[in-house]
Image (cartoon, rainbow, N blue to C red):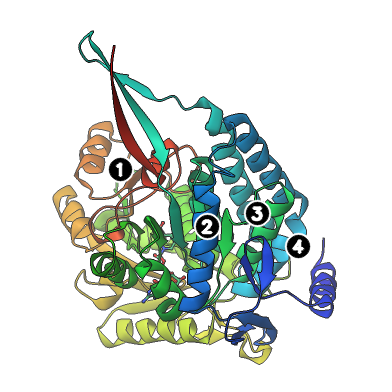
Amino acid sequence: SSRDFWHARAAELLARGIDGRMWIEGRREDAADGQCFDCISPLDGRVLTRVARGQAADIHRAVASARAAFVDRRWAGKSPAARKKVLQDFAAAMLAAREELALLETLDMGKPIQHSLSADVPGAARCIQWYGEAVDKVYDEIAPTADSALALVTREPAGVVGAIVPWNYPMLMAAWKLGPALAAGNSVVLKPSEKSPLTALRMAELALEAGLPPGVLNVVPGYGHEAGEALALHLDVDVIGFTGSTRTGRRMLEYAGRSNLKRIYNELGGKSANIVFADFDDLEGAAATAAGSMFYNQGESCNAPSRLLLQEDIADAFLEKLLAQVPQYAPGDPLDPQTTLGALVDATQTQTVLGYIASGLAEGAQCLVGGTRVLEHTGGQFVAPTVFDKVHKRMKIAQEEIFGPVLAVLRFRTEEEAIAIANDSTYGLHAAVWTRNLDRAVRVSRALQAGTVHVNQYDEDDITVPFGGVKQSGNGRDKSLHAFDKYTELKTTWMRI
Ligand code: NAD
């Protein structure tokens, strides 16, 4: 497909109109007070549609709908095989709507259409399908107690789950919550980001068409301090599955304390260290991965390897190879299938990223490439891929999550120094070590404080592995069977025999 093809499809979609109303009890609904907000595309600044601005009253309706669906067991009471079929049909419906979902995602948050098509839609669909498949393969337990009694340890659905997700991977983050929460038999109220609400609303329609009973999944778009806060404070919500910034994650814990002590699972920010030792023999390959993983999704990835730690002896050679990669990530029209780096999510994000670039320069780091906003004539939000050398570990650009295409390079001499720099962070999401020395690979990966450590690669990913962080990157894990822990309660039933 070509750029023209996608522009024509976008024009058709906009001419038809995009429904921005909420999704409650299996129907589209306006917000109770009729308020909306503009959904603006970062590609060119145009208003894609008006989206319902959910408030506490709307959250209340959505939670009541979810609770009613949970209490009458219209979903949890179905046989595992029946729930599995619905989730598989839901995943298949997403794949069948692949072009439409990909287009919505790209128009809404700016990522290249090629990535929406090849990663986001299939990744989200696979997640739903994988948890669907798991439904009739997970067994409960019998505890090894005395002969006179039987103690059953069963997993029960937690009840009503509030899912609050960010804008950087709207479909994928929604799917990481919906997959395990729905598979476990819960009802869900999903609050997508105000910056990218469109695909979540469309996913909910597809789920209903696939047979998910009304009320089991409700979607209330709106702002964090309105709809988000109301959901996290709601007394009838049992669990919050949150993905977003560490700042908001902190508030989630406060909301729980101020309301019903609901369980909070936080998947938060990161500042992942990517460490290359001088003994690594494929600098070319390591540089290609360092650039590719950093600039993927415009650098708006929680696990972006945004701190590159280079051992002095190879630092200059490595940077030469890295810089040779950068032109491949020239920002371009996200609707062009050739584009590899799209638009940042909105004007605010552009300002944030440019602010970090200015701070890097002010603190004395050396900008090797990029550092500016580009393609301004398009009205879109584009920032050139940027690499800073001579970054000191205490500089702001080494400590804070930038969430844009900005790489900070730090140099080290010894293994101990590399570990110390890597762990000198409030975050602990991902980390990587590149070395051919097996002892060192084991030593360093053990010492790194991170939820995921990569050895000699960075881009492997799969739904079968847990994803999440330590320290202020969060608690709990998305993906894999471990994610069921978040959305289930263990119940012990003692029986005298
Ligand atoms: P954010 O915290 O601003 O918003 C996330 C969600 O929370 C949105 O839906 C937002 O509306 C809502 N929200 C904001 N303020 C709120 C409040 N006061 N009360 C209730 N809800 C509120 O984060 P963001 O800018 O949308 O997303 C980027 C962040 O997400 C980055 O820090 C990134 O690292 C993180 N992230 C983490 C993971 C992970 O798995 N660890 C994955 C993706 C993104």
Q: Residues within 10 Å of mark 2 (few under 14, many from 20)?
A: many
| Mark closer to the chain start, 4 or 1 | 4
Mark 1 closeness class: few <14, some 14–19, many ≥20 residues within 10 Å? some
The mark found on residue 100 in the picture is 4
Task: Check mark 4 vs ligand 1: CB closer than 8 Å? yes or no.
Answer: no
Q: Secondary structure at mark 4?
A: helix
Report the image quarter containing ligand 1.
Answer: bottom left
Amino acid identity at mark 2: Ala
Query: Which of the labelled discs sits on residue 66, or is there none?
Result: 2
- Of labels 2 and 1, the one closer to you: 2
Q: Would you say the residues marked 4 and 2 are in contact, meaning their CB atoms lie under 8 Å apart?
A: no
Residue lying at the far bottom in this picture: please name it: 377
Residue identified by numbered label 3: 121
- The mark nearer the N terminus, 2 or 1, is 2
Task: Please name which of the two marks, 4 or 2, marks the residue nearer to the observer.
Answer: 2
Residue type at tag 3: Val
Mark with earlier residue (1, 3):
3
**In front of the other: label 2 or label 3?**
2
**Ligand 1 has an atom within 8 Å of the beta carbon of the residue at disc 2:** no
* Number of the front mark, 4 or 1: 4
Q: Tell me: residue 497, above or below residue 339.
A: above
Please indicate whether residue 255 sits to the left or right of residue 90 in the image: left
The residues bearing labels 4 and 3 have C-alpha atoms spaced at a distance of 10 Å
**Residue nearest the viewer, comparing 279 with 220:** 220
- Residue highlighted by disc 1: 279
Q: Does any portion of residue 188 appear in the rendered image?
A: no
